[in-house]
Amino acid sequence: MSESPSSAHSNGERTVKCPVEGCDHTGPSRGLHLHVLRKSGGGHGEQNDVPPDLNLANAETVGRQEITVDYPETRKTENVARQCPYCGQVYRGKQGLAIHFGQVVGRKNHPANRDEFPDASDCAIVHVDGDQNIIEVLEADESNVMPSTRLRRQDSDRVEQLLSEIEDATDGETADKVRNLMLTD
């Protein structure tokens, strides 16, 4: 497997001290939020939450650290929308869904153990409109589709059956008008 070309970027990033009393953590300012999210207790609050009274923006600067990051010039990404089987939210490709899984472990209906999550490539590929509403499920393993999505698909099938009956009973114009209204909503 060949490496894609990369572009190195360096900067002198602020090194800050965690503002929680008694915590001796110091590190790049970009990592402070993640530090607080991963810690629990001792003023850090519950794990995966930042206490509302904790001001991370005004953390004490204790120095500067040279940070070099290699950004790939091209990325292999998946250009489809995938649906989280736990919360129903839609994310761009396997990468977006994998990032979401990493952020919600143990929260809001998601498994507490990261190993219990499905592989992102096994999650439903969906077609969404401009407002990110799911129009249809294009490809899915039924075990990884939320029950509400299965119901919407069944409802859609019932509506289409009703429209076909209207079309058969009339000249078809009424059914076409309803279909067009459904597509523009």
Image: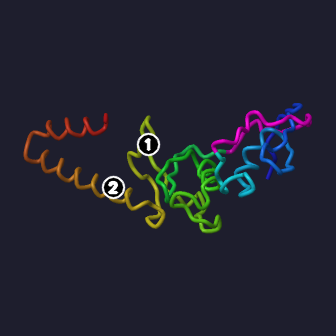
Q: Is 62 left, or right, of 32 in this rendering? A: right
10 Å crowding of disc 1: few (<14), some (14-19), many (20+): some
Locate residue 82, reporting x and y percent.
52, 51
Q: Which residue is at the front of the view, 1 or 185?
A: 185
**What span is colored magenta in the figure?**
52-76
Locate residue 142, reporting x and y percent.
43, 65
The residue to which callout 1 is attached is: 128
Q: Which residue is at the front of the view, 185 or 3?
A: 185
Question: Does residue 113 lie above or below 4 as drawn?
Answer: below
The residue to which callout 2 is attached is: 153
Q: Earlier in the sequence, mark 1 or mark 2?
A: 1
Badge 1 element = strand
- Residue kind at label 2, given as amino acid type: Arg
* Identity of the residue drawn at 47% across and 64% down: 141
Position of the C terminus by quadrant? top left
* Identity of the residue drawn at 76% across and 33% down: 58
Q: Which mark is residue 169?
A: none
> Magenta stretch containing residue 64, yes or no?
yes
Locate residue 140, reporting x and y percent.
46, 59
